[in-house]
Amino acid sequence: IIAGKSLRINTRLYEITQYKSNTSDAISWLEQTETSSKGLYSILDRLRTLTEESINEPLTDDDRLKKIVEMKELRSSIIQEANQNVAGRYIFSGFKTDQKVMFDKKENKSFIIEQSFKSTNGSKIQVDEINKIDVYSVKLGYSQIEEDATVRIGGETYSATDPQCKLVFKNQSDPDAYLTPEVENGPPLVKTIHVIRETGEMIFNEAHFESISDPINVTYKKNGFVSGDLNPVHYFDSYEKNEVKGGVLGVVDANNEITLGHTRGILENSIHNLSIGGVSVVANGVVQAPANVIYTDSNTPVIPGPDDVIIEKDTGKIILGSNYNPGDTVSLDSYYEAKRPSENEEIMFEVNLNNKMTINTQARDLFTLDMINDIDMIINTVENRDRSFATKELSKMLTKLDTHMGNELKIRAAIGTKVNRVDLIKNKLDEDGINFRVLKSENEEVDAYEAVTNLNKQELVYKNALSSISKIIQQSLVDFLR
């Protein structure tokens, strides 16, 4: 019984030690999150002051330049706050703790990004005060995107090559960049959306935008990122370009198969150059006859024909038809792999028995896409737009900054609540540790006074026994023979 009780007590003491370690780690993580959150608030507060001054004070060119420089410095300071880490783990990166929230240097990466907007995401801009002409602006996550982008609204797909649903890319300095894109009644009906290269804004005709009820789904390619850009893996459904080292994937196995390795999903038609056994299968995105390339999923298997190349998007496995041979070398340059952020990337710490809590704040909740876009638009407006336009737009931005600051305060309050909760749990664990050590002592240790008393009693009994025996063996054999 004593041994079983001792085992249970020691097990609980070990658990308490581990839980105390977990609470210490949790407090460290939460306090670092709180520090970064406070830093972000200070940046937003100073940016709000500069924006207000830009509205209310007549600025000389020198004044404007000074404000632009400080605003850009504040924008750069957000990188440090977003990329804070604890023991090498980026605290705002969800499960991807090895990947920064924001790029802090130039990165030659390529992503295909998908974004979806509602009509409520549009901002109304007055571009002609005299004639009361307005347009709507919808801001993408990035500027300088590739011009093969597509915009899908209901059954319509807009692109740079479509003659009726047109995407027209403009420089910000173009005289008609922000002028209302025409909707030509035709026939045929022609609709145009402008895309501003430097800002990533999509500009819609007022009547056209107000008639939209379906989601606005945009797919675009972004090649290369600069310091301050958000890392797409934390914010968007996206596909990252994976380069195949040396351009050689490997050789076909005995089952006429080869794999791209572990993958979260391959973008359909993203393999632009592929050859098997020295024979071209796909060249510059065009399948070469007699080859037939089929993209599918492992749960809908396809039996390959002799010239078929079956690519399982979810597993990365390539299954070849009978006209391809085991041992053939497979060469390809690159493909796009899915990088989808989870809806819920909560990091849970077990801080007591059957008591888990979320200790992380995700980047998209604190360093929101809308916040980053609004800051970029403030800087761009002060730097590039005339005072009349800037005054009206910056006034709207003050309200948006207030919203972002309110969001930061809300998140910081939640962090503070968690810190208090962990502190209470830690104190309880300290008390439990003391109590269980007392129990361990009572169960396993010996009372010294009682032990000495018992020892003396046993020693006296032992001595008396020896005395009795000695008296018995004093009789000799002769004594018994008398």
Image (tube, helix red, strand yellow):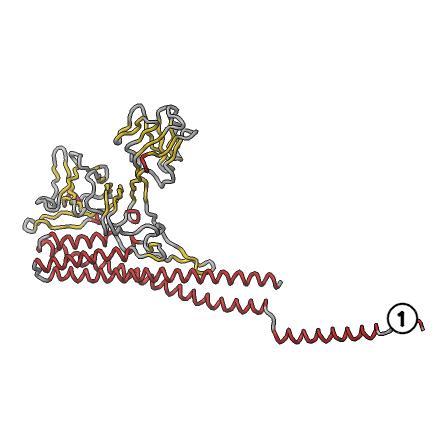
Answer with left or right where residue 5 lies relative to residue 79.
right
Secondary structure category for the residue under label 1: helix
Q: Residue 416: image x %, image y %?
A: 34, 64
Instruction: State which quadrant residue 145 falls in.
Output: top left
Instruction: State which quadrant residue 359 falls in.
Output: bottom left
Answer with left or right where residue 380 lies relative to residue 154.
left
Q: Residue 457: image x %, image y %?
A: 70, 75
Answer with left or right where residue 96 lies relative to residue 455.
left
438 and 260: which one is in front? 260
Q: What crowding class fits label 1: few (fewer than 14 Cα within 10 Å), some (14-19), or many (20 or more)?
A: few
Residue annotated with mark 1: 477
Query: Which residue is painted at 35% across and 24% down in the image?
Result: 307
266 and 189: which one is in front? 266
Where the C terminus falls, by quadrant? Answer: bottom right
Query: Which residue is painted at 17% across and 45% down in the image?
Result: 202
Q: Residue 251: image x %, image y %?
A: 38, 31
Q: Is residue 115 above or below residue 7?
A: above
Where the N terminus falls, by quadrant? Answer: bottom right
